[in-house]
Image (cartoon, rainbow, N blue to C red):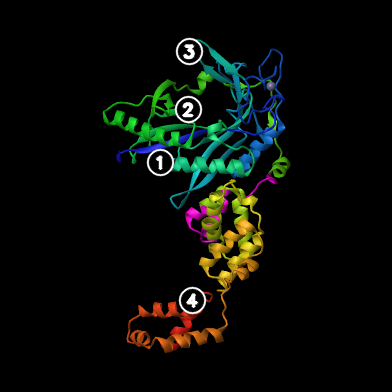
Amino acid sequence: MKDFELVIWLEIHVRINSETKLFCNCKNAVELASEPNVNACSVCMWFPGMLPVLNKEAVRKWALAGLAMKCSVNNISKFDRKSYFYPDLPMGYQITQLYEPIVSNWKVKIIDDGEIKEFGIHHMHLENDAGKLIHAWWKTLCDYNRAGSPLMEIVTEPDFRSKAEVMEFVRELQKMMRAVGVSNADMEKGQMRCDVNISIRKPWEDVLNNRVELKNLNSPSAIWRAIDNEFKRQVKIVSEGGIVDQETRWWDDEKGMSKPQRSKEDAMDYRYFPDPDLLPLEITDEEVAEIAKDLVELPIEKRIKYLEEYKLQEDDARLLTTDRDLSLYFEKLLELTNDAKKSCSYITTILMALMKESEDDIKITDLKFDIEQLARVIELVNKDELSSTNSKDVVEALFKKWGKADEIIDQRGLRQTNDTGALEQIVDEVIANYTEQVEDYKSGNERVFGFLVGQCMKASKGQWNPKIFNEMLKNKLD
Ligand SMILES: [Zn+2]
């Protein structure tokens, strides 16, 4: 296996969540509709004489997705017909963009195993989706709810060398689409589909061997398993002196194997030609600038900032940026505390555990206590007025009963006093009472020091700060 490397590029379809379909006023079935053929009209059923009218909202979202990925939005793009004869598309062709797509040439960043990597995007174009066919053994049922829904097709460069890179890229893309509100990109709901083109080569070779396009990868785990399976299949063929057929293969996730679907067509077979029903789409620089106002900071940009600026651990940075509300909460808390590490750990280890344990599926936006109270807890811990062990109880009390951090701390007697006079008295007493241990320590037995601190804590009934006892004892004994 080590003799070969994977070369992968992706074709990813993302369903845009516009109100209506791409060329008509039918409701765009973002979620699966309850009944078949309720969202279908004479335009998307392509009755004779019907003309497509391009949906402005879909175009806007499409451009926004492009801008989010730092691509250039072309001022002029054109629509082409792709001949396609199959009952799931009544028009007999798909309206797509072959020659002049809307956006081109950009790179998407991901973090793979702690390393920031970039993957080239060849282009992204807009097209209409086909309907859904349901095959029963004696007949085929057609559901056109989906026919004419706006799809973005993102075509990458062959930059991927491992399935881990592919998975990370797909996840990052999902997060991006959600962040800019263009699509929920839920694979299980058919809002995102990913076709994977795979070939193998010897690492020192420059040529690309025949590629196989894998289809029907409906979940991240299917992508993972299918790449693995296809890599092994191709290595076996080539190792035995064979040649991999250039074809499209259908992944059967239940059986964990693929089967040939058809040999891969060339662009020629589709007989692309400019669509005479649609004028070239013009987007001016001013319009692009207007659309760009809806951009937000992307999850990957946040993650890089969390790692490099805030010095968080990779897992924490990933966790906090998966959900926009969660990252906003973290940033607000950081603003109040100026302590990235503690702001992160109080959210990821304490709050999130409480949210997980809670019965009613509480989200970060559902918290009943003010964020200022959590910031106050962190402040008191940093001032050594609250021990970090006790701070967990305070957060739990805030979570369950709300209120104010200071009140909870005083009610429960958790405030650590740093009144040096009283503390000194305790330290002196301990030194006087445990002369044997003190001598032991002075003669070099460091281990007994913890015992002395423990006695001070005991005498103070655990309310005072061990750190200060530590210092005081050291000053007096060393
Ligand atoms: Zn329609």
Pointers 4 and 3 in contact (C-beta within 8 Å):
no
Q: Which residues are magenta?
A: 292-317
Q: Determine crowd level at label 2: few under 14, some 14-19, many 20+ residues with C-alpha closer than 10 A.
A: some
Q: Is residue 61 left or right of residue 229?
A: right
Q: Which residue is mark 4?
A: 466
Distance from the alpha carbon under mark 3 to that under mark 2: 20 Å
Residue 200 in the image: x percent, y percent?
Answer: 36, 34
Q: Are marks 3 and 1 in contact (CB under 8 Å)?
A: no
Are the residues flagged by discs 3 and 2 in contact, CB closer than 8 Å? no
Q: Which mark is residue 174?
A: none
Name the residue beneath numbered marker 3.
Answer: 137
Q: Is residue 114 left or right of residue 200?
A: right
Which structural element holds mark 4? helix
Residues marked 4 and 1 touching at CB (< 8 Å): no
Q: Nearer the viewer, mark 3 or mark 1?
A: 3
Q: Regarding mark 1 in the picture, which secondary structure is present there?
A: loop
Q: Nearer the viewer, residue 443 or 298?
A: 443
Residue at the far top in the pictured view: 138
In the displayed structure, 478 sits above or below 407; it is: below
The residue wearing badge 1 is 162
**Residue 13 shows up from this direction:** no
> As shown in the figure, which amino acid type bears the numbered disc 2?
Asn
Reply yes or no: does residue 461 show up in magenta.
no
Q: CA distance from mark 4 to mark 3?
A: 76 Å
Disc number at residue 216? 2
Residue closer to the observer: 459 or 380: 459
State the separation of the CA atoms marked 1 and 2: 19 Å
The residue positioned 53% from the left and 70% from the top of the image is: 387
Does the beta carbon at disc 2 come under 8 Å from ligand 1?
no
**Could you give the CA–CA distance between mark 3 and mark 1, rounded to whole angstroms?**
39 Å
Q: Quadrant of residue 55?
A: top right
Distance of mark 2 from mark 4, alpha carbons?
Answer: 61 Å
